[in-house]
Image: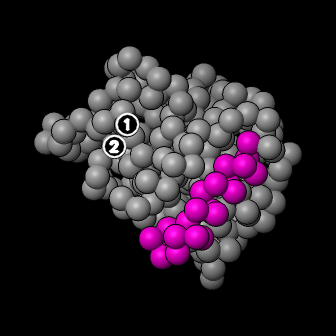
Amino acid sequence: MPADPLILMYHSVEPYQADPYRVTVHPRRFDEQLRWLRRRGLRGVGMRELLAAPSAAGLVGLTFDDGYRDFVTEVMPALQRYRFGATVFVVAGGIGGHNSWDEPGPRKPLMSAAQVRRAAGAGFEIGSHSLVHRRMPALSDGELFDHVRRSRLILTELTGAEVTGFCYPYGAAGAREAEAVRDAGYDYACAVQPVDPAGRHTLPRTFVGDRDGGARLWAKMARHRLRAARQPAVTTR
């Protein structure tokens, strides 16, 4: 596994009028961001490919949380134009529904079962964003066990492929959650901020929003490099 890979975190990509939680990127801005990456010799890839690479040189992980319908309608066509890959983390118990955890914010439809299969069939990695979108440290041990294992089973059965990646809702995780995810058979898991203990099941990511043009992306990449230089490389365990 590459040491301290750069992983970008997106949520939704679509035209919008209100975005109080700053989870939406306009398609025009998204295209600008992808073009910016390519011009700097970077290729967007899914997590499985990123972690399997001997080096992260020239690669950047692209991740999309929640499994919004616009992953199929907006994100996939844009990524395919640039020949980029990505991982989309799906809330297994919310397929075909909407982002109820953001109420009373704007209602966003989630992918249907057919759309999840379509994304997988197009070569995009499907990962688990748990069973429901709840902070995992607030779950009992029994709930935690159920959510991480059942979501993996649902998505594996739906896609016909083994689901090896997990993403913590809200990035909320600690040693207990990381252990539960690892014991459930996931190969890796994504958080947001650095988590103690650092490792393959608590990978930090860099948030990307609609305000992030070239200058802000450059600053975020520089911040990532500085953080990586100050911290020990994550382990492969």
Q: What kind of element bears circle 1?
A: loop
Residue placed at 61% from the left, 31% from the top? 79
Q: Position of residue 231 (x, y in %)?
A: 17, 42
Q: Which residue is drawn at 36% across and 59% down?
A: 175
Task: Estimate how packed mark 2 is, as few (under 14), some (14 to 19) or many (20 or more) residues with alpha carbons within 10 Å.
Answer: many
Query: Where 98 sits versus 71, above or below?
Result: below
Q: Where is residue 19 in the image (x, y as percent from the top left)?
A: 55, 68
Q: Can residue 7 be seen in this view?
A: yes
Find disc 1 in the rendering and name its residue.
237
Q: How is the image coloured?
A: one colour
Name the residue beneath numbered marker 2: 199
Percent of width and height locating residue 102? 60, 74
The N terminus: image quadrant: top left
Pick the quarter of the image with the C terminus: top left
- Prevailing secondary structure of the magenta residues: helix
Magenta residues, start to end: 135-156
Is 67 positioned to the left or the right of 198 in the image? right
Which of these two is toward me, 19 or 150? Answer: 150
Identify which amino acid the numbered label 2 is placed on.
Answer: Gly
Of 155 and 125, nearer the camera is: 155
Query: CA separation, marks 1 and 2?
Result: 7 Å
Residue at x 29% of width, y 47% of height: 198
* Residue 113 or residue 222, whichever sits in front: 113
In the image as oriented, which residue stretches furthest toward the right? Answer: 114
